[in-house]
Image (cartoon, rainbow, N blue to C red):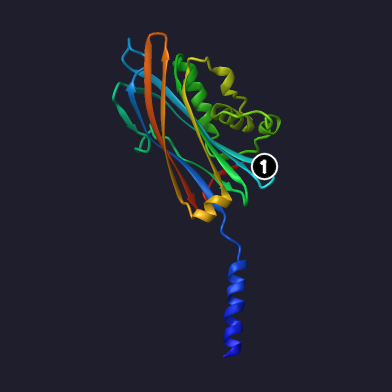
Amino acid sequence: MRYIFHYFILLFILSSCARQPVLTAELVPRSLKATNLEETISRHDELMMAYSLTSYDAQNKPVGVVNGGWGVGSLRKNQQLDLQAAGAGQAKPIGLELPKNGRIVASIVLIEVDDYNRAKETMAKIQQIHNVVAIPVGLLVAATEVLTPLKYVSAGLMATGVGLKLVDKLDDDDLLGQSSMELREADIRQKKQRFVHVPAEFTGRHMRDAFSYRLEYDILLKTAKIQAVRQ
């Protein structure tokens, strides 16, 4: 009987020491609705989105980033787009491993397009490096400043080597909204969290025109490996 008791004690110790599976975060844009438009003359807005996941290790060093993009799309007042509907208009998810005792920052920006051709060129570059894992070296330099979602997305794009700095391509009036969510590996393990739903409201005014958008996105935590491409 004593040997059986020792066996179960040993089994418990071994199971406690077993390595926990690596978690992967997946950012999934879900829907975008225009409740009020920035452009009242044409009665529709031309929009694009850029988004990223940036991971930090236990020493708070940025170790990986992936990027995604959607657009250019047209939206009328009270129209809602399903961003996961099959077809060319789908906002494809991105995924990145969550370092042990580290964290991941999910960032997304919504942009009103003034120059359609330039926006299409920008989006084509973003989609070329969709879900490619890169090292966000630029974030090491900016570690002492407060990083907005726009700066996260821009730094992520620069890290891929495509030569695209999103911040420099935007006027103040072009940015309709930005959102971010931080997830820490220790908190997720403790809470056994596997899903985060983020509703983001973007409102503002340009001259006489007021705008209002509702963007919804999810962050899924998975143990299965997401096939992101490494540079």
Pointer 1: residues within 10 angstroms few (<14), some, or many (20+)? Answer: few
Kindly identify the residue that appears in the image at 52 percent across and 14 percent down.
171
| Relative to 192, residue 102 above or below | above
Type of amino acid at the residue the image marks with label 1: Asn
Where disc 1 sits, the SS reads loop
The front one of 198 and 231 is 198
Looking at the picture, tell me which residue is in the foreground, 99 or 71.
99
User: Horizontal and vertical percent for residue 107?
Assistant: 52, 34
Residue denoted by label 1: 60
Q: Answer left or right for 47 relative to 4.
A: left
Q: Seen from this angle, which residue lies furthest left?
A: 78
- Where residue 221 appears, as percent x and y from the top left, is 49, 49
Along the line of sight, which residue is nearer the eye, 194 or 124?
Answer: 194
Name the quarter where the C terminus is drawn.
top right
Q: Is residue 40 left or right of residue 184?
A: left
Report if residue 127 is visible in the image: yes
Quadrant of the rendered image containing residue 161: top right
Instruction: Determine if residue 224 is in view.
Output: no
Residue 200 vs residue 81: left or right?
A: right
Q: Position of residue 169 (x, y in %)?
A: 55, 18
